Image: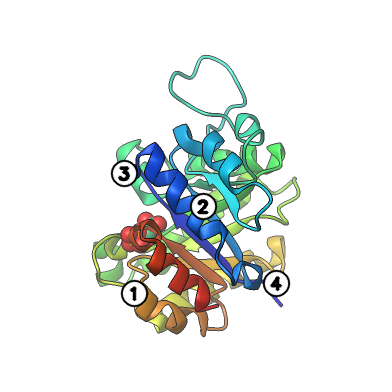
Amino acid sequence: MRKPLIAGNWKMNASRNDALALATTVAQAPRLANADVVIFPPFLWLEAVARAISGSNLGLGGQDCSAEDRGAYTGQISAPMLTELCDWVIVGHSERRRDAAESDALVGRKARAALLAGLRPIVCVGEAIDARESGRHEHVVGGQVEAVLAEVSDIDTSTLVWAYEPIWAIGTGRSASPSDAQAMAAYIRSKTRSQLGEDVRILYGGSVVPENATTYLSEPDVDGLLVGGASLKADQFLAIIEAC
Ligand code: PGA
């Protein structure tokens, strides 16, 4: 039985005060034990948020990490640095693939760096609208998945989580249908089964709101949700946690 995972990606949002207030509210949610619940605030607030939620069941993570452990990489944050404040990290989010030109291979190296440092990586994959409309979505996502698998073939991958986030569904209000999310999750599971086993968790992300959360969670291969916009509103995020 795979434990549900609800992840809140705050992106570049929330002042320090807003971050502390939101994190404190979520940390007091009555149903936190039903799932792994993890928030991903901006790097700058991680230390203060870690202190605010210490002793609770709420998990904490960074929104990205470097593929390198240390050195002349201005502006980057390494996985070993993150381990001093949190247990989780998102890698390969489509906004980083787009804005920082992150390749499939670099995302694989980041996942490797995260795993070797002892972080639990949520590795994002997903196709653009043209790939979906031309029926190439499995080909695109399959390539992204293979690039990561190639980088982690010789290390312990038991904490790796996939997040299927179709780019056209992120922040658009146009969520994927539960059956499309299920079909892609099943495809990712079948592609990764021989290397990662049956128990790897696969999330859906893209315009998740309280109203559609249960429709994804009822699909057999969807083990949780990666939530953007709705994770910034305490009442919405709490309602999504309740859906577990
Ligand atoms: P959204 O973002 O829920 O606002 O669509 C999801 C994500 O980017 O992880």
Give the mark, 3 or 2, whose residue is nearer the N terminus.
2
Q: CA distance from mark 3 to mark 1?
A: 20 Å
Determine whether the beta carbon of the residue marked 1 sits less than 8 angstroms from the nearest atom of ligand 1: no
Colouring mode (rainbow / by chain / secondary structure / one colour)? rainbow
Q: Which residue is mark 4?
A: 198
Residue 144 in sight from this viewpoint: no
Q: CA distance from mark 3 to mark 2?
A: 32 Å
Give the mark, 3 or 4, whose residue is nearer the N terminus.
3
Q: Is residue 105 above or below residue 135?
A: above
Disc 4, SS = loop
Q: Nearer the viewer, mark 4 or mark 2?
A: 2
Determine whether the beta carbon of the residue marked 3 sits less than 8 angstroms from the nearest atom of ligand 1: no
Determine whether the beta carbon of the residue marked 2 sits less than 8 angstroms from the nearest atom of ligand 1: no
Residue 176 is labelled as: 1
Residue at image location 56% in from the left, 39% down from the top: 110
Q: Quadrant of residue 112?
A: top right
Contact check, label 4 and label 1, Cβ < 8 Å: no
Residue 154 in sight from this viewpoint: yes
Name the residue type under label 1: Ala
Q: Alpha-carbon neighbours of circle 4 within 10 Å: few (<14), some, or many (≥20)?
A: few
Contact check, label 3 and label 1, Cβ < 8 Å: no
Quadrant housing the C terminus: bottom right
Disc 3, SS = helix
Q: Position of residue 13 (x, y in %)?
A: 33, 45
Disc 2, SS = helix
Q: CA distance from mark 4 to mark 1?
A: 24 Å
Q: Which residue is mark 3?
A: 98
Q: Which residue is mark 2?
A: 24
